[in-house]
Amino acid sequence: MTRFRLLVSGTVLGATLACKTTEPQPVPVQLALSVAPSATAQSGVALSPQPVVQVQDGSGNPVADQGRQIVAVLASQGGALIGTLEARTDAQGKATFTNLGLSGPAGQRTIRFDAAGLRSVSADPITVGPGIAATLTASAGNFQTAAAGTSVAV
């Protein structure tokens, strides 16, 4: 329900009537994901797409609420959040994360987004898979040669 404030003036000894309506400012109550991260992620790699969190009123309408700090928190066991874990809302009340990612062993993780005084929002579970190999190490058979498609003794 939208509420308006109506201010009415009357005619007094020939003065003109004036009428003015004002809409009250929406009250920030909760957070919502306007862009959710993908359902899968690679360990140690930034999420794609990056989460975008919107401040909303109690009816789910966007609220312009610039400068509010939004914090990403790992809400499940195992692994860690990496990258910049905080973002501030812009003039439209949106906070865009830029390099948020997950690291650790393969498995499901849930990210929750918090802001002081507002109801939090959680992303759907994200399945984390192995990351990019950082190094390769030969464990046996070093310096051996063989024709392509043939066996090599270890």
Image (spheres, helix red, strand yellow):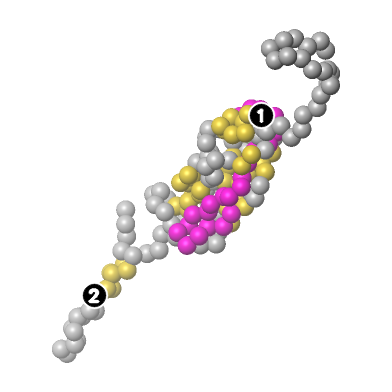
Q: Is residue 48 visible?
A: yes
Q: Which residue sits at x=52%, y=42%?
A: 49
Q: Residue furthest front?
A: 147
Q: Earlier in the sequence, mark 1 or mark 2?
A: 2
- Location of mark 1 (residue): 130
The quarter of the displayed image where residue 3 is located: bottom left
Who is closer to the viewer here, 135 or 45? Answer: 135
Q: Is residue 77 visible?
A: no
Residue 88 magenta: yes
- Around disc 2, counting alpha carbons within 10 Å, would you say few (fewer than 14), some (14 to 19), or many (20 or more)? few
Q: Three-letter amino acid code at disc 2?
A: Cys
SS at circle 1: loop
Is 16 placed above or below 113 here? below
- Location of mark 2 (residue): 19
Q: Percent position (x, y) of residue 64?
A: 45, 60
Q: Three-letter amino acid code at disc 1?
A: Pro
* Label 1 to label 2: alpha-carbon separation: 65 Å
Q: Percent position (x, y) of residue 14?
A: 15, 89
- Around disc 1, counting alpha carbons within 10 Å, would you say few (fewer than 14), some (14 to 19), or many (20 or more)? some
Q: Which residue sits at x=37%, y=64%?
A: 24
Asked whether the beta carbons under mark 1 and mark 2 sit within 8 Å of each other, the answer is no
Task: State which region is magenta.
Answer: 87-109
